Amino acid sequence: MMKESETQTKIVGGNGFGEEDFQKVAQIVAANKGKAGGIIRILQQAQGLFGYLPVPIIEKISQLTKVAKSEIYGIISFYSFFTMVPKGKYVIQVCMGTSCYVKGGKKILDALKRDWGLETDGITEDGRFSLDTVRCLGCCGLSPVIAVSGEVHRKVKPGQMGDILNSYS
Ligand code: FES
């Protein structure tokens, strides 16, 4: 079992996968051999292990399962819960739906970039936060809206981002 600090290092670095990692992937593949929906389970478990699905791991899964890489990439892009980019301990979702955009969603993104060095699909150096944009979080009447690891914050002003994010340690 990988320690959390080791996982974070790999997530932040985004590369450096070695034999030990490939052996863990081989164990996941072996454990799911012949099971219905095996490739999806394998991808879920690999993502659970690494935090995301890096290219070297996808290639290893393809090699071991004999499922074409193109098919695996198709599955990853079809299911929104799969990601090929590293995610932080906390995932910030900034709503860029029409209502939130008009009421300041872009200014929130600008503040995250300016004050936290966060770009869309990016991750902070310490692995604490990553940033996604979404189309609508379902509370347009209280826009602009963000969510931090599923916890929704409404009527957010860019100047509040520091207080909001610092409440997640
Ligand atoms: S547009 Fe942002 S919550 Fe709907």
Image (cartoon, helix red, strand yellow):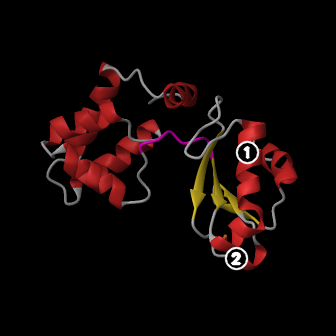
Nearer to us in this view, 66 or 157: 157
State the mark number for residue 140.
2
Binning the other alpha carbons within 10 Å of mark 1 as few (below 14), some (14 to 19) or many (20 upward) gives many
State ligand 1's quadrant: bottom right
- Whether pointer 1 and pointer 2 mark residues with C-beta atoms closer than 8 Å, the reply is no
Q: Determine whether 111 is above or below 79 in the image.
A: above
Q: Is mark 2 within 8 Å of ligand 1?
A: yes
| Quadrant including the C terminus | top right
89 in the magenta segment: yes
* Residue 23 at x, y percent in the picture: 28, 27
Q: Among all residues in the image, which is located at the extreme front?
A: 102
Q: Name the amino acid, label 2.
A: Cys
Which region shows up in magenta? 84-90
* Residue 3 at x, y percent in the picture: 52, 28
Mark 2 lies on a secondary structure that is: helix
Q: Quadrant of residue 122?
A: top right
114 displayed left or right of 29:
right
80 displayed left or right of 5:
left
* Residue 12 at x, y percent in the picture: 54, 29
Nearer to us in this view, 76 or 47: 76
What residue is pinned by disc 1? 112
C-alpha gap between disc 1 and disc 2: 21 Å
